[in-house]
Amino acid sequence: MDLSKVKLFDLSQPIYHGCPAYPKLGTPQITRTSYRVREGFNAETLTVSTHLVTHVDTPEHFYDGTGDSASLPLKNFWGAGVFIDLRGKVGADEPIGPALLGPWLDQIEPGDFVLINTGWHLKRSFEEDYLKKWPYLDGEGALALKNLGVAAVGIDSLSLGGYGSKEKARPCHEILLGAGILILEEVCFPESVMDGKKRPVSAFPLKIVGGSASPVRVVAYDF
């Protein structure tokens, strides 16, 4: 098998000490525990919530016993990616519903990964817009995607749901996770994947027993 022609696209935000994170969950901490000049090797300890940085929410996040990051089959974390371009079409703290998703709905097939680019990944910082005022998928938008039989829905903000109230935060999670649909958060979109092409996407989690979420390296592929 010749893999030299495969192109890989990284759709993940970098993890670094104290990087921006969902409020109240702390920030990732990276501590150097061994030094090559002292112990002969370098090693680090990473302390991070499973719901921070680029990560996947499993149904276990809202529904006990419905599938964690260790028990779900690997095939659930791999699918054809549909890239929805909402840059300049949705603003701070605005809901994403069926009307905004409409131009892409006829491209979506059962089992697809729907990835929503709002442009928020470029705002990654400690500013309020990134930490508290991102665009979010509302209940009607989530229901429209659920009814199409998608396998996962991702967005480039700290959460697929909105910040500040249960009415904004919970509906998309309840609808999608309740149907066994994965949620990807803090996805990053290089310009090279925004060409309208449908391409395979993987988001394999760590095998965490009881894991309601897991950091992931989201990757898109051209074969």
Image (spheres, grey):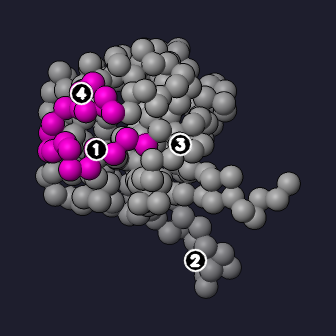
Q: Which mark is residue 35?
A: 2
**Label 1 to label 4, Cα distance in Å?**
11 Å
- Residue range corresponding to the magenta coloring: 83-103
Which residue is under mark 3?
198
Which residue position holds label 1? 86
Q: Is residue 164 above or below residue 54?
A: above
Contact, CB < 8 Å: mark 1 with mark 2? Answer: no
**Mark found first going from the N terminus, 4 or 3:** 4
Can residue 153 be seen at all in this image of the molecule?
yes
Q: Amino acid at mark 2?
A: Tyr
Image location of residue 217, percent across then percent down: 54, 50
Residue type indicated by callout 1: Leu
Badge nearest the viewer, 2 or 3: 3
Q: Is residue 19 left or right of residue 47?
A: left
**Quarter location, residue 69:** top right
Q: Which mark is residue 99?
A: 4
Question: Regarding mark 1 in the picture, which secondary structure is present there?
Answer: loop
Q: At label 4, which amino acid type do we have?
A: Ala
Disc nearer the start of the sequence (2/4): 2
Query: Where is 86 relative to 122, above or below?
Result: above
First reached walking from the N terminus: tag 2 or tag 3? 2
Crowd around label 2: few <14 · some 14–19 · many ≥20 (10 Å): few
Please say if the residues under marks 2 and 3 sit with CB atoms less than 8 Å apart.
no
Tell me which corner region of the image, top left, top right, bottom left or bottom right, holds residue 76: top right
Sequence order check: which comes first, mark 1 or mark 3?
1
* Separation of residues labelled 1 and 3 (CA atoms): 16 Å
Three-letter amino acid code at the position of disc 3: Lys
Q: Is residue 25 above or below residue 7?
A: above
Question: Is residue 103 left or right of 7 when viewed as pictured?
Answer: left
